[in-house]
Image: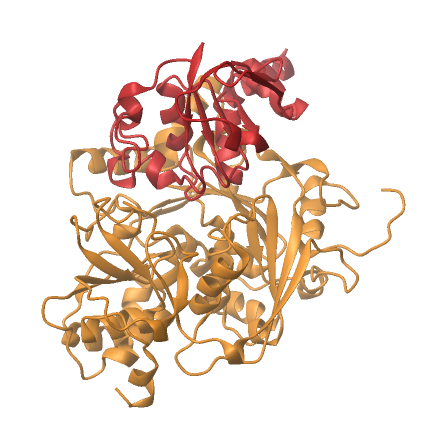
Chain colours: A orange, B red
Amino acid sequence: MVGQVSGRTLVEKVIAKAAGLPDVRAGDLVTAKVDLAFAHDSSGPRRWRPLLEELGVGLWDPAKVAIVSDHYVPAVDAESAAILKTTRDFARDYGVSNFFDMVGICHLVLPEHGLIRPGAFIAGGDSHTPTAGAFGAYAAGYGATDMAAIAATGETWLAVPETIRVEWSGSFAPGVTAKDVMLFLCRELGMDNAFKAVEFAGPLVEAMPMAERMVLANMAAELGAETGVVAPDAVTFAYLAARGAPVEDEAAALALHSDADAAYAAVHRFDASDLVPQIAAPHTPANTRDATEFNEIRIDQAYIGACVGAKIEDLRMAAAVLKGRRVAPGVRLLVAPGSARTAELAAREGVMETLLAAGAVLMPSGCGACAGMGAGILAEGETCISSTNRNFQGRMGHAGANVYLGSPYAVAAAAATGRIVDPRPFLTGAA
Amino acid sequence: MSRAFVFGDAVDTDLLAPGNLMKLPPAELAQHCLRAIAPDFASTVQPGDVVFAGANFGLGSSREQAAVSLRLLGVSAVLATSFARIFYRNAINLGLPAFVFPQVGEVSDGDRISLDPVAGRLENITTGKTYALTPIPPHLMAMIDDGGLIPHLKRRLKGAAA
């Protein structure tokens, strides 16, 4: 490129490497080689197989493919059972050893198994693929046909996206979480940021554990962004080492950080000290207001689940609110741990005991009611508050149901009171 | 001559292809397309009709059923002021032309229109206005010309094997 006047963003660096080019700039059209291609039981094998057979090819590299059954698990009817069998058969017939059958949601299972690497170019058949960007990878979602083509060829075309940098200073007050950051940003930045990457940075982000960084990257999808990223650092390295998959070249991973003189589409700066718990009202994540503005909305169901809201850290938040309390009469609290490992940890730590003693109903680990495909969907006129990432009309069941979004603290507080309330008094002992 | 169906901003994939119905075969699922906001759409739309919409059309899930349902109902193109990224890619991959069209506000639901996706020309017969559409990028037009990503890839793979 002539006239290089600025440095490169993390996303430009990762894409350049994947495209085999010394340098790329936002707007360049490139073909990138994929390091990891994954899909689940809904978007993957049942769509891929007919297309691969039509093309007359197998997987370009089975070792770089992962398949996770998380949408139709466990099978509740003949169609679900058939879809899960199709998925198993595909993994067997096409030699996919990274096959995870009913052990949790793909965006949690893959990091748990150390498969998400800093600097990787990751393609996923799911809109929350950006979750992996929390590890300093470029991870974007694609439809099933796009993914089948990637599965066959190991590459895909893209226009290098511009990056919006979002810097957070300060620290969270008790009861405030990365989920509140993302609901706030859906309102502030809107949900129309298509073909842009969002880079999360600043002291607040650097102090976050991987679970909270994954919330940021995950809900970049709700900003409409192509992906969300957090630069890899010691926190990232420690997480992967603890899972038996240490980063071999930490210097190379650190070199992925955006250059000080990188060019951004926009830079936004916020202070977390000002942030209070947020609640998104129906029917969009952008319809977000301070939790202090809510006190009268009665709920029928509280749902702790999904890739963004059912990690062990999220279950601990719910347990912190519900310890010694009971779910309010007339309210159902459903808890769907995001993975089998999460459920195991929760049991071992006593978190599961706290939630069950409060009256929570334990659900299978999977996408569940979040996408309207699993157990716990809503009837007409019902109101639910959920730790998930989307509340579009009809998503969690009947088009006449109302879904609010909040952090696990907010969901648990609503379960305890039967109303949507500010969860902070529950943590300071004032409730 | 085709009919224009006009929708607003943020038409999401849960409206286009409801999640709890995604087990249905594609043709059946298509009958539920946009049911929550336009109950008569699926039964009224005719092959060749065109969907117009505002900003961020197709936001939400990566499910390509959102684009498949529109195509199976015979929608010949989608014109919106802006598209969500994954939906845009899915539409092109499946051979459903998607044009960025800033003047959606000048089209009313039910207008009689004539669209030539190849020439990139839209005529609103009801208002008498014509428009030159922002072209779909050439590398994507090549895919649409081939009938979508898979036919395009088939040609490429055959070419490589020859």
Q: Is residue B156 left or right of residue B33?
A: right
Task: Indicate left or right for A82 with A181 as reference.
Answer: left
Residue at the extreme right of the image, as rendered: A3
Front in this rendered view, residue A408 or A338: A408
Q: Residue at x 45, y 45 (%)?
A: A127
Left or right: where A91 falls relative to B35 = right
**Which of the 4 quarters of the picture holds residue B19?**
top left
Q: Position of residue A346 (x, y in %)?
A: 28, 72
Question: Image point 45% across, 37% down: which residue?
Answer: B58
Of B161 and A190, which appears nearest the observer? A190
| Badge count | 0
Query: What residue is at 34 percent from the left and 41 percent from the top?
Result: B14
Q: Position of residue B43 (x, y in %)?
A: 26, 21
- Is B12 left or right of A244, judged from the image as shown? left
Q: Quadrant of the C terminus of chain B?
A: top right
Q: Nearer the viewer, residue A366 or A407?
A: A407
| Residue at (34, 58) in percent of width and height | A388
Q: Position of residue A46 (x, y in %)?
A: 34, 31
Question: Quarter of the image containing the N terminus of chain B?
Answer: top left
Residue A76 can be seen, yes or no: yes
Q: Is residue A200 above or below residue B79?
A: below
